[in-house]
Image (cartoon, grey):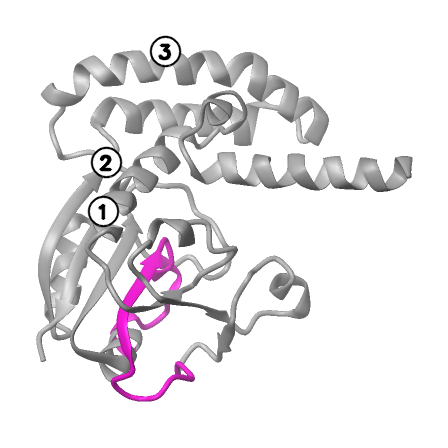
Amino acid sequence: MIIALFKSTFEILKKNYYKAQFEPTILSIFINPSYFIRRDLFNNISILALKIQGSLLDFGCGRKPYQNLFTNSFSYIGLDLDHSDKLKNNVFADLFYDGVTIPIEDYTIDNIFSSETFELLPDPNQILCEFNRILKPGGKLLITVPFVWEEHWRPYDNVRYTEIGIKNLLQNNGFEILESRKSTSYFASVLQLFITYLWRVVFPNNKLLKGLFTILLISPFNLLGIIIDFFSRKNSDSYFYLNTVVLAHKKN
Protein backbone atom coordinates (compact mmCIF):
# COMPACT_ATOMS: atom_id res chain seq x y z
CA MET A 1 0.00 0.00 0.00
CA ILE A 2 2.73 2.44 1.03
CA ILE A 3 4.92 1.41 -1.90
CA ALA A 4 2.04 1.89 -4.34
CA LEU A 5 1.30 5.33 -2.87
CA PHE A 6 4.97 6.27 -3.14
CA LYS A 7 5.13 5.17 -6.78
CA SER A 8 1.94 7.07 -7.60
CA THR A 9 3.24 10.24 -5.92
CA PHE A 10 6.58 9.91 -7.68
CA GLU A 11 4.91 9.56 -11.08
CA ILE A 12 2.80 12.67 -10.44
CA LEU A 13 5.87 14.68 -9.41
CA LYS A 14 7.77 13.38 -12.42
CA LYS A 15 4.93 14.35 -14.77
CA ASN A 16 4.67 17.86 -13.28
CA TYR A 17 8.44 18.30 -13.43
CA TYR A 18 8.52 17.39 -17.12
CA LYS A 19 5.54 19.65 -17.83
CA ALA A 20 7.30 22.56 -16.11
CA GLN A 21 10.28 22.11 -18.43
CA PHE A 22 8.20 23.07 -21.48
CA GLU A 23 5.30 25.18 -20.19
CA PRO A 24 5.68 28.62 -18.53
CA THR A 25 4.25 27.80 -15.11
CA ILE A 26 5.12 29.24 -11.70
CA LEU A 27 6.94 26.00 -10.93
CA SER A 28 9.08 26.47 -14.06
CA ILE A 29 10.62 29.63 -12.64
CA PHE A 30 12.11 27.65 -9.75
CA ILE A 31 13.17 24.39 -11.40
CA ASN A 32 13.74 25.12 -15.08
CA PRO A 33 17.21 26.38 -16.08
CA SER A 34 15.89 26.80 -19.65
CA TYR A 35 12.92 28.89 -18.58
CA PHE A 36 13.21 31.77 -21.08
CA ILE A 37 13.81 29.73 -24.22
CA ARG A 38 11.05 27.26 -23.32
CA ARG A 39 8.63 30.02 -22.25
CA ASP A 40 8.88 31.93 -25.51
CA LEU A 41 8.79 28.81 -27.67
CA PHE A 42 5.65 27.69 -25.86
CA ASN A 43 3.98 31.09 -26.23
CA ASN A 44 4.78 31.42 -29.95
CA ILE A 45 3.75 27.86 -30.75
CA SER A 46 0.52 28.41 -28.77
CA ILE A 47 -0.43 31.35 -30.99
CA LEU A 48 0.37 29.71 -34.32
CA ALA A 49 -1.05 26.30 -33.35
CA LEU A 50 -4.52 27.86 -33.38
CA LYS A 51 -4.12 28.32 -37.16
CA ILE A 52 -3.64 24.58 -37.65
CA GLN A 53 -6.70 22.49 -38.52
CA GLY A 54 -7.07 18.86 -39.54
CA SER A 55 -4.63 15.98 -39.27
CA LEU A 56 -1.15 16.75 -37.98
CA LEU A 57 2.21 14.99 -38.09
CA ASP A 58 4.65 15.91 -35.30
CA PHE A 59 8.03 15.36 -36.97
CA GLY A 60 10.70 14.64 -34.35
CA CYS A 61 8.00 14.43 -31.70
CA GLY A 62 10.06 13.24 -28.72
CA ARG A 63 7.63 13.12 -25.80
CA LYS A 64 5.06 15.33 -27.60
CA PRO A 65 5.36 18.29 -25.20
CA TYR A 66 3.20 20.58 -27.35
CA GLN A 67 0.41 18.18 -28.36
CA ASN A 68 -2.23 19.85 -26.18
CA LEU A 69 -1.73 23.17 -27.99
CA PHE A 70 -3.17 21.83 -31.26
CA THR A 71 -6.80 21.93 -30.22
CA ASN A 72 -8.08 22.10 -33.81
CA SER A 73 -6.33 18.92 -34.91
CA PHE A 74 -8.52 15.81 -35.00
CA SER A 75 -5.55 13.52 -35.59
CA TYR A 76 -2.10 13.86 -34.00
CA ILE A 77 0.65 11.49 -35.19
CA GLY A 78 4.06 11.55 -33.55
CA LEU A 79 7.04 10.49 -35.67
CA ASP A 80 10.65 10.15 -34.62
CA LEU A 81 13.91 8.68 -35.84
CA ASP A 82 14.40 4.95 -35.46
CA HIS A 83 16.95 5.22 -32.62
CA SER A 84 18.20 2.46 -30.35
CA ASP A 85 15.70 0.78 -28.03
CA LYS A 86 17.02 2.88 -25.12
CA LEU A 87 16.23 6.13 -26.89
CA LYS A 88 12.88 4.81 -28.10
CA ASN A 89 11.79 4.46 -24.48
CA ASN A 90 12.16 8.23 -24.07
CA VAL A 91 9.84 9.18 -26.94
CA PHE A 92 6.09 8.84 -27.43
CA ALA A 93 6.21 8.26 -31.18
CA ASP A 94 3.42 6.53 -33.04
CA LEU A 95 5.71 5.93 -36.02
CA PHE A 96 9.46 5.64 -36.55
CA TYR A 97 11.35 6.42 -39.76
CA ASP A 98 14.77 5.54 -41.10
CA GLY A 99 16.02 9.12 -41.51
CA VAL A 100 15.17 9.15 -45.21
CA THR A 101 11.61 8.06 -46.01
CA ILE A 102 8.58 8.97 -43.89
CA PRO A 103 6.26 5.91 -43.77
CA ILE A 104 3.10 7.82 -44.76
CA GLU A 105 1.23 7.77 -48.08
CA ASP A 106 1.31 10.67 -50.55
CA TYR A 107 -0.96 13.69 -49.99
CA THR A 108 -2.62 12.37 -46.82
CA ILE A 109 -1.54 14.86 -44.10
CA ASP A 110 -3.09 18.31 -43.57
CA ASN A 111 -0.31 19.79 -41.42
CA ILE A 112 3.20 19.12 -40.16
CA PHE A 113 4.74 20.42 -36.93
CA SER A 114 8.46 20.20 -36.19
CA SER A 115 10.12 21.81 -33.17
CA GLU A 116 13.91 21.97 -32.66
CA THR A 117 14.60 19.12 -35.06
CA PHE A 118 15.85 20.60 -38.33
CA GLU A 119 19.25 21.50 -36.87
CA LEU A 120 19.81 17.76 -36.44
CA LEU A 121 19.10 16.78 -40.03
CA PRO A 122 22.04 15.98 -42.34
CA ASP A 123 19.91 16.79 -45.42
CA PRO A 124 16.95 19.12 -44.66
CA ASN A 125 16.17 19.48 -48.37
CA GLN A 126 15.48 15.75 -48.60
CA ILE A 127 13.12 15.88 -45.62
CA LEU A 128 11.30 18.90 -47.04
CA CYS A 129 10.86 16.90 -50.23
CA GLU A 130 9.22 14.22 -48.10
CA PHE A 131 7.02 16.87 -46.45
CA ASN A 132 5.87 17.97 -49.91
CA ARG A 133 5.10 14.38 -50.80
CA ILE A 134 2.88 13.60 -47.80
CA LEU A 135 1.22 17.03 -47.39
CA LYS A 136 -2.06 17.76 -49.11
CA PRO A 137 -2.11 20.78 -51.48
CA GLY A 138 -2.05 23.92 -49.34
CA GLY A 139 -1.02 21.93 -46.27
CA LYS A 140 0.65 23.90 -43.49
CA LEU A 141 4.06 23.53 -41.86
CA LEU A 142 4.80 24.96 -38.40
CA ILE A 143 8.49 24.76 -37.60
CA THR A 144 10.83 26.06 -34.89
CA VAL A 145 14.61 26.12 -35.20
CA PRO A 146 17.41 27.42 -32.96
CA PHE A 147 19.53 30.39 -33.99
CA VAL A 148 21.68 30.72 -30.84
CA TRP A 149 21.97 27.69 -28.59
CA GLU A 150 24.54 25.26 -27.25
CA GLU A 151 25.51 22.13 -29.14
CA HIS A 152 23.18 19.27 -28.30
CA TRP A 153 22.20 15.75 -29.36
CA ARG A 154 25.74 14.91 -30.41
CA PRO A 155 26.69 13.68 -32.96
CA TYR A 156 23.51 14.73 -34.81
CA ASP A 157 23.69 18.50 -34.26
CA ASN A 158 24.60 19.98 -37.65
CA VAL A 159 23.57 23.61 -38.16
CA ARG A 160 21.96 26.82 -36.83
CA TYR A 161 19.43 28.91 -38.76
CA THR A 162 18.87 32.65 -38.88
CA GLU A 163 15.32 33.75 -39.60
CA ILE A 164 16.40 34.56 -43.16
CA GLY A 165 18.09 31.19 -43.50
CA ILE A 166 15.11 29.05 -42.51
CA LYS A 167 12.72 31.14 -44.60
CA ASN A 168 14.95 30.75 -47.67
CA LEU A 169 15.22 27.01 -47.06
CA LEU A 170 11.45 26.64 -46.95
CA GLN A 171 10.82 28.90 -49.94
CA ASN A 172 13.40 27.04 -52.04
CA ASN A 173 11.55 23.81 -51.30
CA GLY A 174 8.06 24.82 -52.38
CA PHE A 175 6.69 26.52 -49.26
CA GLU A 176 5.26 30.01 -48.88
CA ILE A 177 5.87 31.86 -45.60
CA LEU A 178 2.67 32.90 -43.81
CA GLU A 179 4.14 34.19 -40.55
CA SER A 180 7.55 34.34 -38.89
CA ARG A 181 8.44 35.09 -35.26
CA LYS A 182 11.78 35.61 -33.53
CA SER A 183 11.57 33.93 -30.16
CA THR A 184 13.12 35.49 -27.02
CA SER A 185 14.19 39.12 -26.66
CA TYR A 186 17.80 40.32 -26.68
CA PHE A 187 18.03 40.62 -22.89
CA ALA A 188 16.31 37.30 -22.19
CA SER A 189 18.56 35.57 -24.75
CA VAL A 190 21.74 36.81 -23.08
CA LEU A 191 20.45 35.95 -19.60
CA GLN A 192 19.36 32.48 -20.76
CA LEU A 193 22.84 31.74 -22.09
CA PHE A 194 24.38 32.87 -18.79
CA ILE A 195 22.01 30.68 -16.79
CA THR A 196 22.75 27.73 -19.08
CA TYR A 197 26.48 28.28 -18.51
CA LEU A 198 25.97 28.14 -14.73
CA TRP A 199 23.86 25.02 -14.97
CA ARG A 200 26.10 23.16 -17.43
CA VAL A 201 29.58 24.24 -16.36
CA VAL A 202 29.62 25.75 -12.88
CA PHE A 203 27.12 23.63 -10.97
CA PRO A 204 28.17 20.15 -9.75
CA ASN A 205 27.12 17.10 -11.77
CA ASN A 206 25.35 15.49 -8.82
CA LYS A 207 21.63 15.58 -9.66
CA LEU A 208 20.50 16.37 -6.12
CA LEU A 209 22.98 19.21 -5.69
CA LYS A 210 22.25 20.51 -9.18
CA GLY A 211 18.55 20.64 -8.37
CA LEU A 212 19.22 22.45 -5.11
CA PHE A 213 21.49 25.00 -6.83
CA THR A 214 18.81 25.53 -9.47
CA ILE A 215 16.18 26.39 -6.86
CA LEU A 216 18.49 28.59 -4.80
CA LEU A 217 20.54 30.36 -7.48
CA ILE A 218 18.83 30.12 -10.86
CA SER A 219 15.30 30.96 -9.72
CA PRO A 220 16.36 34.49 -8.60
CA PHE A 221 17.86 35.06 -12.08
CA ASN A 222 14.62 33.86 -13.65
CA LEU A 223 12.54 36.17 -11.49
CA LEU A 224 14.81 39.15 -12.13
CA GLY A 225 14.85 38.35 -15.85
CA ILE A 226 11.06 38.25 -16.04
CA ILE A 227 10.84 41.76 -14.57
CA ILE A 228 13.58 43.31 -16.71
CA ASP A 229 12.42 41.51 -19.85
CA PHE A 230 8.90 42.86 -19.37
CA PHE A 231 10.11 46.46 -19.43
CA SER A 232 12.87 46.06 -22.02
CA ARG A 233 11.15 43.82 -24.59
CA LYS A 234 9.47 46.68 -26.47
CA ASN A 235 12.81 48.41 -26.94
CA SER A 236 14.74 45.25 -27.78
CA ASP A 237 16.16 44.90 -31.29
CA SER A 238 15.62 41.73 -33.26
CA TYR A 239 19.19 40.90 -34.21
CA PHE A 240 19.89 38.55 -31.30
CA TYR A 241 17.39 35.84 -30.40
CA LEU A 242 17.34 32.15 -29.58
CA ASN A 243 14.80 30.64 -31.99
CA THR A 244 12.74 31.27 -35.08
CA VAL A 245 9.16 30.06 -35.33
CA VAL A 246 7.72 29.92 -38.85
CA LEU A 247 4.30 29.06 -40.21
CA ALA A 248 4.27 28.23 -43.93
CA HIS A 249 2.08 26.38 -46.39
CA LYS A 250 2.72 24.16 -49.39
CA LYS A 251 2.30 26.12 -52.62
CA ASN A 252 0.61 23.38 -54.60
Q: Which mark is residue 241?
A: 2
Could you tell me the amino acid type at mark 1?
A: Thr
Q: Would you identify the image quadrant in which residue 6 lies?
A: top right
Residue wearing tag 3: 224
**Measured Cα–Cα span from mark 3 to mark 1:** 24 Å
The span shown in magenta is 101-126
- Residue pictured at 61% horizontal, 57% vertical: 90
Q: Residues within 10 Å of mark 1 (few under 14, many from 20)?
A: many
- Residue pictured at 69% horizontal, 22% vertical: 209
Q: Residue furthest bottom?
A: 105
**Measured Cα–Cα span from mark 3 to mark 2:** 19 Å
Is residue 26 in the magenta section?
Answer: no
Could you tell me the amino acid type at mark 2?
A: Tyr
Quadrant of the image for the N terminus? top right
- Residue pictured at 65% horizontal, 19% vertical: 212
Q: Do tag 2 and tag 1 residues touch (Cβ < 8 Å)?
A: yes
Q: Position of residue 47 (x, y in %)?
A: 23, 44
Is residue 112 in the magenta section?
Answer: yes
Q: Secondary structure at mark 1?
A: strand
Residue wearing tag 1: 244
3 vs 2, front mark: 3
